[in-house]
Image (cartoon, rainbow, N blue to C red):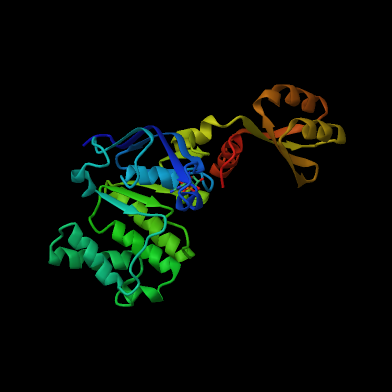
Amino acid sequence: MSDVVLEVKDLAKRFTLVELERLLELKPSAVVKRVEAVRKVSLTVPTGQVYGFLGPNGAGKTTTMKMCMDLIQPTSGTIQIFGSTPSDPSIKQRIGYLPEHPYFYDYLRPQEILDYFGRLFGIGATERMRRIDELLSRVGLQHARNRSLRKFSKGMLQRLGVASALINDPDLIVLDEPLSGLDPMGRKAIRDIIIEERAKGKTIFFSSHILSDIEHLCDRVAIVVNGVVKREGELSSLLQSDTRTSEMLLRNVSEEALTLINAHSTSATDMGSSTWKAVVPQSEMSKLLIQLLQCGAIVDELQPHQDSLEELFVRVSAEGSAVC
Ligand SMILES: Nc1ncnc2c1ncn2[C@@H]1O[C@H](COP(=O)(O)OP(=O)(O)O)[C@@H](O)[C@H]1O
Ligand SMILES: [Mg+2]
């Protein structure tokens, strides 16, 4: 088995919108508007990992995923899935996909929907029934298996969407915002499924806005802003390589020392009893340390300050404005 399931290189997608009124009036000079939804996206999704695709609203995540799923065609760039192209029918059997807005006929019931998808994949009746039971239980919908979908909440439909993405026991699971619209129990159920699937050796590629979930689940992430991937790689090394500050805990901080701290730190927190915690850029550190010691401050702790994913996300997002 190859080490990489999905490889995307320099992907771009431009939508061309022609003003409808002009078209209907059949004017020759129809107004054409171009939307650069994806400008430059490159990703490497290794086998057996959980890959998080993050970015602000309108950054191009859904458009990228749709191109990977062969639902829309790229303007330029290449996509390789399982060493083939997204349009290759033989690889579709190995992929499960949850769209951003899953749609089901609302007169059907979960049991019927999953049975229908199972049949599309050519799964035999006994195995279909076994998988439907198992999946309904994993997404917490067994009690509603025979309830028609018009009585379902958004969160329940989302759970069903995840179950239908898994009916073919796919090797690559692509989930567009799987945690949206879910209550805490629903989020936990989907997080558990992602972890269980990775333990089985499956690859999960998902987008989300919920950074704490990404931080706990993902081995690798890409941050896309305004159609461009700004950071891509192992989560731990991204958080590490963006570390440019140290955190110091200081005692015996005089007025004079506090003025220095405020002038040179990016944040300073009063811990009480003349003790302060300060986050200081690496470039300022040596100079500040010498001056603080001269003022009689005592350094109790000094350690590299590792970014949280939220800090990294906010900083990277600010580097390029999103089209919302
Ligand atoms: N079918 C479309 N036609 C025109 N513009 C589109 C279409 N789909 C998406 N867009 C635009 O492309 C940009 C990226 O959208 P999308 O991929 O949905 O972002 P995300 O999933 O990151 O929120 C947005 O500006 C959006 O309005
Ligand atoms: Mg989206």
What residue is at 47 percent from the left and 62 percent from the top?
A: 181
Determine the residue positioned at 27% across, 41% down. 86
Question: Which residue is located at x 30 percent, y 70 percent?
Answer: 110
Which residue appears farthest toward the right when viewing the image?
255
Q: In the image, 312: left or right of 296?
A: left
Q: Is residue 295 left or right of residue 88?
A: right
Residue sitting nearer the eye, 76 or 201: 76
| Observer able to see residue 51 | no
Q: In the image, what residue occupies the spot 26% across and 65% down? A: 114
* In front of the other: 298 or 302: 302
| 201 in relation to 238, above or below | below
Give percent across and percent down for residue 64: 40, 42
| Residue 184 sits above or below residue 34 on the image | below
User: 211 or 87: which is nearer to us?
Assistant: 87
Q: Does 124 appear above or below 316?
A: below
Q: Is residue 121 visible?
A: yes
Quadrant where the N terminus is found in the figure: top left
Residue 148, given in percent of the width and then of the height, sits at 33, 76
Q: How many marks?
A: 0
Could you say which quadrant of the image residue 293 lies in?
top right
34 with respect to 115 (left or right):
right
Whole-percent x and y of residue 22?
Answer: 50, 49
Looking at the picture, does residue 178 appear above or below residue 27? Answer: below
Q: Name the image quarter holding residue 167.
A: bottom left
Query: Residue 193 location in percent, x, y?
Result: 35, 57
Camera-side residue: 185 or 159? Answer: 159
